[in-house]
Image (spheres, grey):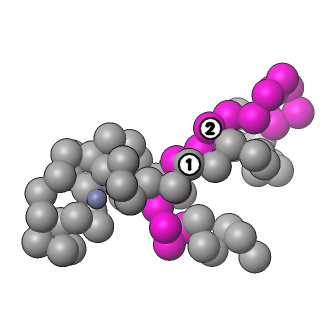
Amino acid sequence: MKCYICAQEGKTTEAAGICIVCGMGLCTDHMVRSDVDLWEGGYPFPAQKMKKALPRILCPECHAALQE
Ligand SMILES: [Zn+2]
Ligand SMILES: [Zn+2]
């Protein structure tokens, strides 16, 4: 999979991760890692049972949307 954002800029960079919200492929320059807060609702894992926060990989758009 290629980085979707790089592809939009005319570059082909191999994706190093995938946005867990929209499934967009992301290279290391474009992924946003956030491992602070878990979502409520238990998807994909039951949040209540986690001993520590899971790292999340988001695209910039989804990260911005989740900041509100
Ligand atoms: Zn990229
Ligand atoms: Zn996304």
Q: Amino acid at mark 1?
A: Arg
Q: Are the two marked residues, 2 and 1, in contact with CB atoms closer than 8 angstroms?
A: yes
Q: Tell me where residue 25 appears, x and y as whole percent.
A: 32, 53
Please name the residue shown 36% across and 55% down the image: 29
Q: Quadrant of residue 35?
A: top right
Q: How far across and how far down the image is residue 52, in percent?
A: 79, 28
Label 2: element kind = loop
Whether label 2 lies within 8 Å of ligand 2 gets the answer no
Q: Is residue 36 above or below residue 7?
A: above
Tell me where residue 16 appears, x and y as whole percent: 32, 41
State the residue in front, 1 or 36: 36
- At 18% from the left edge and 74% from the top edge, which residue is drawn? 9
Q: Residues within 10 Å of mark 2 (few under 14, many from 20)?
A: few
**SS at mark 1?**
strand
Say whether mark 1 is within 8 Å of ligand 2: no
Q: Which mark is residue 33?
A: 1
Residue 44 visible to an observer of this rendering: no
Residue range of the region highlighted in magenta in the rendering? 47-62
Left or right of 46 in this view: 10: left
Picture quarter with the C terminus: bottom right
Left or right, residue 49 beside residue 34: right
| The magenta stretch spans residue 61 | yes
Distance from disc 2 to disc 1, alpha carbons, whole Å, reads 7 Å
Residue 55 disc label:
2
Q: Earlier in the sequence, mark 2 or mark 1?
A: 1
Callout 2 amino acid:
Pro
Please, is residue 25 above or below residue 63 in the view?
above
* Residue under the point 18% across and 66% down: 7
Residue 44 on the magenta span: no
Please state the quadrant of the image where ligand 1 appears: bottom left
Q: Quadrant of residue 50?
A: top right
